[in-house]
Structures are given as structure tokens and as C-alpha cells.
Amino acid sequence: MSARKLFRTILGLCWLAPMATGPATAADLGGYAKSAISEAFFAERRQPGVSIAFVGATPAGDRLALSFSITPFVWVTNRPNRITDVAQADLVVVHLRSFKQLGATTDLDPRIAPIVQKNSQALERGGACTKITETHSGGLKRGFLFLSLEDNEVLRKSCLYGHVRALFGLREDGEIGEFADTFLADLTIARCISQMALPQPHPAPGEAKTAIVQALASGTCERGRR
């Protein structure tokens, strides 16, 4: 799919997202949300916006894919996003040429060298699309997502989408299905999470997830924060 066609598709889906609240659709959406929503998301402290950083020889197509993925979520949740430096980022996207012998690599970017060396065995075992999470100031978490330049573009884009949606309350490993269907459902769920405006971190993450699922099933997300 060309970049222009993909952008038109995303625009259309974003326009439709607020309309996906009819009774039948809402009931189906509630079922999907049970598996799609990340309970851990509600247990974490978060910034009002979302910040992304890139490290390594990032292909232009990957930057474009991340932009196409994150922009609709930003639109439906009204959470600002920006490209920033590693020290301020919520998600750091790291492109490596190889996952072999990372502990002995000497040409790593100094901004990510300590975390790569500290987690070299986990990265070598996990390979591409492995995420390492660290807690920094104020209890905020920063994720380092490692991609391989040896992988094809489709695999990298799929990985990027999973981790972008996780920034808005969904699990990184989504259900398999038609992209247009799951993408629209993901946007609607993210929008509901934003509308409900539950306290964060939530004292009972499981209850928070249940509240979102019930609101989606009954079509009452917008009334949840009143």
C-alpha cells in the first residue's frame, strides 16, 4: 500500500471511530476490549503527552510508519505527541544492524549503550521487537524498543504499531484480524480510556479495566467522567 493510500485509509478510519458506538458494535467491542486492553497500563504513572525518540540508522519508512500509527491515536485521545531526545522519551525506538554479541559491541550510541550492555543476553535471546522497560524519575517508565535492520519493512511496521497502541492503553500483542477492523476498534478503545479519565496510577487496575470494558459495551464512555 502506498503512503498516500495508507494516509487516506487512516483518515477515513479516524473519522469513523467516534461512530462505532451502536448497540451491536458496542457489544462486540466490549468482548474485544477484554483481551485488547492492558491492565498494567492503569497501574502506571504517565505524562499527559507521548514522547518518542529514535536511535540508530532509522529508515525513513519506519519514521513514516510510526507517524501514521500514532497520529490517529493522538487525534482521538487529544494527547499531544512529540519527537524528543532519549532522556525525555516514553518510547525509544532503536535500530540495530545485528543482535549478535551485543555485550562486546563497541560502536553503540552512548545514549543506549548502558541499557544494551546491561540487557545484552535478553536482547540476543529475544531478537528484533524486544522491548526493555526501565523506571526513571518520578516513577515514570521508559521503553526501549529494539528493531533489526535485517528484518523486512513489514515486520518492523507491525512491531511499531503494537508498541504505539500500547502507549494508549492496549496490549502490545494484539489479536490477529483484518487491520482495518482491529485498527478502528483500537482507536475506539483508546478514545474511551481517554474519555473516562480514570485516576492514574489507579489503585485497582483490574477494576479500571473492567470499567472501560463495561463502558464500551454499553456505549457510555463519554458519560464516564461526569
Image (cartoon, rainbow, N blue to C red):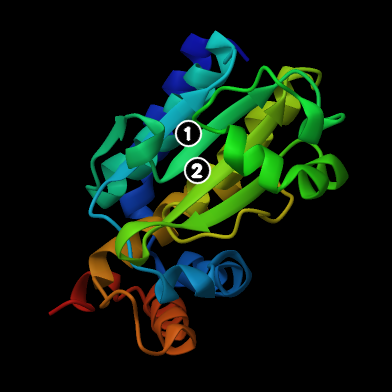
In the image, is 151 to the left or to the right of 68?
Answer: right
Residue at (59% x, 49% y) in the render: 182
Q: Nearer the viewer, residue 38 or 211?
A: 38
Q: Position of residue 79 (x, y in %)?
A: 25, 47
Residue at (37% x, 48% y) in the render: 17
Q: CA distance from mark 1 to mark 2?
A: 7 Å
For the C terminus, give its image quadrant. bottom left
Which residue is the site of mark 1?
69
The answer to whether mark 1 and mark 2 are in CB contact below 8 A is yes
Q: Nearer the viewer, mark 1 or mark 2?
A: 2
Quadrant of residue 202 within the rendered picture:
bottom left
Q: Amino acid at mark 1?
A: Ser
Q: Position of residue 40 (x, y in %)?
A: 51, 72
Taking the image as drawn, is residue 97 in sight? yes
Which residue is the site of mark 2?
164
Residue at (49% x, 28% y) in the render: 66
